[in-house]
Image: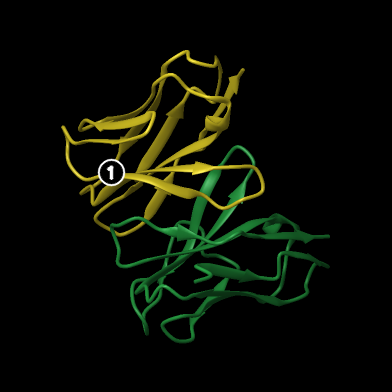
Chain colours: A green, B yellow
């Protein structure tokens, strides 16, 4: 039981490049989330998926897209990376909205 | 707009010195208030969920309480291994999750 896994662990991009962050959970959870964490600002919700087949915007969705590929997987795509997207990205999952979330180990992204 | 403010930003305690962390919030239709612990370089780890004013939950040296405007995380007789950043979050009626910036706790032996 691996919980929530994220790939890659580290990534360096140049401005304008695109990439997809992958997230998978093996706990049969319905809800999945993407956050970014910046120093002094705490975690901010980018997008979430309440259940398979649905996605909704969070607090800071601009510059990102998501895909809920199936119940296990939820990916985050940066189409044209900008230095302001340098951050640590966390994926999380939960049985439903309004209950505790389980977090992955994070992806540290640097955009030059 | 939902908001979460945590205080203090940082707290240094001696081993055994009890204290409390504060989480003040404004939210439309509280679905839940959450406490997490985060160690450096790792993802947050769930501690407690509180759903309504007056509710309390305990786990080892930690106790979380909730009122209509704030939550407290009480730490009794802390040990060095309790050193971490403690995060508070609320989920409101619009399903958005809002986290506070956290309190960085250091417990000296």
- Where disc 1 sits, the SS reads loop
The residue that label 1 is drawn on is B27
**Coordinates of residue B27 in the picture (x, y in percent):** 28, 43
Left or right: where B93 falls relative to A86: left
Q: From the image, which quarter does the C terminus of chain B lie in? A: top right
Q: Front-most of B35 and A36?
A: B35
Q: How many marks?
A: 1
Residue A110 placement, left or right of B104: right
Q: In this view of the protein, which residue sits in the foreground, A51 or B84?
A: B84
Seen at 73% across and 77% down, the residue is A18
Residue at image coords 71%, 65%: A9
Q: Residue at x 72, y 68 (%)?
A: A81
- Figure check: A111 above or below A29: above
Tell me where residue A20 appears, x and y as whole percent.
Answer: 65, 77
Name above or below for residue B16 compared with residue B93.
above
The vertical placement of B17 against B9, above or below, is: above
Q: Mark 1 lies on which chain?
A: B
In the image, A2 versus B88, the foreground residue is A2
In this rendering, the answer to whether A19 lies above or below B17 is below
Where residue A111 sits, quadrant-wise, is bottom right
Q: Mark 1, residues whose alpha carbon is within 10 Å: few (<14), some, or many (≥20)?
A: some
Q: Where is residue A84 in the image (x, y as percent from the top left)?
A: 70, 55
- Looking at the picture, how far across and down is residue B69, in whole percent? 25, 31
């Amino acid at each position: 039981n691996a919980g929530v896994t994220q790939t890659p662990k580290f990534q360096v991009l140049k401005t304008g490049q695109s990439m997809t962050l992958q997230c998978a959970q093996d706990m049969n959870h319905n809800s999945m989330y993407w956050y970014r964490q910046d120093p002094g600002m705490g975690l901010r919700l980018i997008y979430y998926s309440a259940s398979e087949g649905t996605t909704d915007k969070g607090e800071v969705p601009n510059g990102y897209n998501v895909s809920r590929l199936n119940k296990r997987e939820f990916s985050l795509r940066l189409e044209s990376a900008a230095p302001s997207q340098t951050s640590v990205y966390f994926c999380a999952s939960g049985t439903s909205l309004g209950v505790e979330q389980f977090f992955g180990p994070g992806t540290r992204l640097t955009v030059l | 707009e939902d908001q979460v403010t945590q205080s203090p930003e940082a707290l240094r305690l001696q081993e055994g010195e009890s204290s409390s962390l504060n989480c003040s919030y404004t939210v439309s239709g509280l679905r839940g208030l959450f406490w997490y612990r985060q160690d450096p370089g790792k993802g947050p780890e769930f501690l407690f969920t509180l759903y309504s004013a007056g509710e309390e939950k305990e786990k080892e040296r930690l106790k979380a309480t909730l009122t209509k405007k704030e939550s407290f995380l009480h730490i009794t007789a802390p040990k060095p291994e309790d050193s971490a950043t403690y995060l508070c979050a609320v989920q409101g009626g619009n399903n958005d999750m809002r986290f506070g910036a956290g309190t960085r706790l250091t417990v000296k032996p």
